[in-house]
Image (spheres, helix red, strand yellow):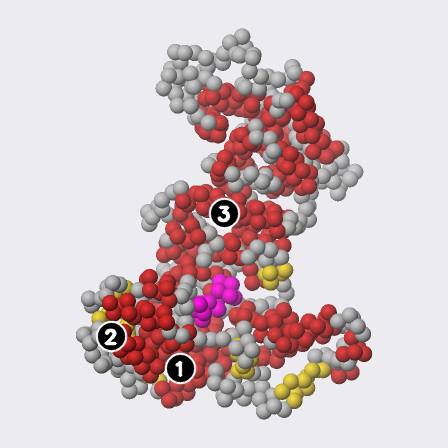
Amino acid sequence: MNRATAKHLIEGYYRQLTQGCGNGDCTNEFCASHGDFQPLDNNSAAAKALEMFKINAKLCPRPSKSESDPSRPGSSADERMSDIDLSSAKEDFSDVHYLTENNVCTILSFCEEEGDYSALIRVIGRVFSSSEALMKSFRKDEPNATELVDSWTPTGVDKDEEQSEQSSETTRASSSTASPDESPKEDHGPCEVTVDIDAVRRVYDRLLTIDQLEASLVNALVYLTPNMVLDLDYLDVYETTPDYLNIFVIVMENGNLHSPEYLEVALPQFCKAMSKLPVTALARLSRLWSTYGLPHIRRMMETFQQLITYTVVSNEYNAQNLVNDDDTVVAATQCLKVVFYANILGGDVDVEHNDEDEDDSESDELSLHELLGEERLYKKGPRIDPLERALGVRTIDSIRPLIPFEDFVNESVNDVVEMDKDFTFFKVNAETKFSFQSCPFILSVITKNQGLYYDNRIRMYSERRLTALYSMVQGQQPNPYLKLKVRRDHIIDDALVRLEMISMENPSDLKKQLFVEFEGEQGVDEGGVSKEFFLLVLEEIFNLDIGMFTYDSDTKLFWFNSSSLETEAQYTLIGIVLGLAIYNNCILDVHFPMVVYRKLLGKKGTYLDLSDSHPALYQSLKGLLEYTGNVEEDMALTFQISHTDLFGNPILYDLKEQGDQIPVTKENRQEFVDLYAEYILNKGVERQFRAFKKGFLMVTSESPLKYLFRPEEVELLICGSPKLDFEALEKTTEYDGGYTKDSQIIKDFWETIHLFAEEQKRLFLQFTTGTDRAPVGGLGKLKMIIAKNGSDTDRLPTSHTCFNALLLPEYSSKEKLKERLLKAITYAKGFGML
């Protein structure tokens, strides 16, 4: 069956579904003239016509022209969907086979004069429902658009037609051999397409003001997209015709794609077709869209976000019916990824200043996983997204995106995604199942933290199994935990020695679950003792008397001391502690500038990072760059800088060889600023930070951390949320032992807590949970329990920090409650058995 015949049949089915055959006694259930037929809207009729064509459904005899109603011009299906029977009319524009701005304006002017848009509706419907016609439309080289080489065969074309087209193609190609640069398969630049974008936008601006055209555009897209899916799936049409991308460029300029008319059928099918494009095509789209500017990128983002949200809220998902299996949500998310990278490319990007990746050598334990058939579960996961690789840009390269990353998070998806299943797809079935962790921009940090939690726990269980196997083989006592026994008064020495031995002898032990024991104390570590351990270690390490870090009283941030006398092992310990905190889901009270987390994820510090870490220096260097006077004479700077060491002695450093002889001028001041920042943030602390990062990677090297989280999210994982919302905590707190939210002492308790000062609130959190920081997502995510601990007494409240449980006696008065509680949180220290 050739293309014309197939098109004629589909139109016949469409006419039969919308108008019927005219036979009042028709028995065809797929005919509008059948007595029990339920009327269909245009969208549903178009989709149904395609289905009937595929199954070769019954087609009623077509009524003769004398039976049709000539008084209704433009109302028949032929007039709406094609120009087959209109060639006799001069004003039907049946000779328009593709669109240009000129011919659209001509047809529009004619229709406005006639007061009837039927001709324009027919032309728009005909062109927008044909991939071949749409691909030729709105060319930058409009006069030559009719000479486009048809180097592909649309779905449904028979062999005779294909051979005929190939023959004509050969003729056209042979006529252009004298100009080899004019090849049918053009090698477009990274952002180039043959579409005149401005012309397309001007045309849409006029067309979208005509209400009658909306249905034609929707129906055309419904008709067009299934064939596009087949073309891309089975014919690899983009490989032979890169200009096939023009279709997606033109359609996405429609500013009404987010409207309800498109959300049901047209846009989901279009997203499915777009998701079938090869990575090279998606990269071209992303680069092109990155040049559009903020309003257009936001419109496209909101279009795909609206489709995702509309689909999610219109369906019910559970463990058996996963959102991961919803083709519309998956396709729209993949399309949103293209916009996400366009958003990065369109903003401020730094693709340079990257730290060289450490060699990720496989450990001995991995071979045992292979022997156990578990290598797929414990593999390191996808390193680089294919689209990311094609574009040569990563999320961490973004300095300032056009649209904040938070706007790409879809809360509807986060509410329904089953992270345990999604994690399995991400780690094991990535080739056959879609995982939202492959598009982490759509997930909130809370949801991604759940995925990281599953990854960490599975690795812990893996290490336990390996330990059990080794102990069986070697006849030794199994040690399934990372056990640290420390003395409170010598916590750094004890922890350093133990962790240093582990890191040298068996680094994989760092991936076991942490179990801390304080010498001379009875506390059993179910999480609370570990929190206390981290707190004490950090208090000791960040003590300014030790000199490992410098402290800025204005920013309240720490930075590496370039002249520290401590060994690299001390900095490695800090890195291990940060890694263990993430790995064991503990919150730390750490105050580093954001550049530390950027460097941990593979970037080097730059001049812009100084605004956070060294604001005074940043302002000075910014003033130098903006100075309009004579830099050399007025500033009297050279490429030699000075700073003070641990004891306050000045240290001179040449940014360039013989820097003291090189004056800073207007021409070289940017180089001076860059070298200054490079020294402060990278070279000057290279020894300290290299050891620190080494310790961090000992724990997190096989984690998907750097592929799921941005630097600010890593800070949130380590440090928690600084905002303390005790109203949210009150709403989520549970009660036990006879207490309820309506108990008088519970009411007194919350009234007392809400009146506490900020410092007292932090002390209460420290006493109850082991940390004074809120977890990722805020205090509302903290499951605290308040349990009754006897009747009125002089005993102080106690807590189980492992379980975030407060044991509160039923005090006789509000004043006594406040006095006992303040004393407990102020002087609490140590662990015991209750």
Q: Identify the disc placed on residue 813.
A: 2
Q: Position of residue 62 (x, y in %)?
A: 49, 13
Q: Quadrant of the C terminus?
A: bottom left
Name which residue type carries label 1.
Answer: Leu
The residue that appears at 61% across and 80% down in the rendered structure is 684
- Of residues 801 and 243, the one nearer the viewer is 801
Q: Which residues are magenta?
A: 709-723
Q: Residue at x 58, y 40 (%)?
A: 255
Residue 176, horizontal then vertical, whole percent: 76, 36
Label 2 CA crowd tier, 10 Å (few <14, some 14–19, many 20+): few
Q: Amino acid at mark 2?
A: Ser
- Examine the image and state in which quarter residue 393 appears: bottom right
Q: Is residue 435 visible?
A: no
What is the C-alpha distance between the residues marked 1 and 3?
A: 45 Å
Looking at the image, residue 181 lies above or below residue 830? above
Q: Residues within 10 Å of mark 3 (few under 14, many from 20)?
A: many
Is residue 718 shown in magenta?
yes
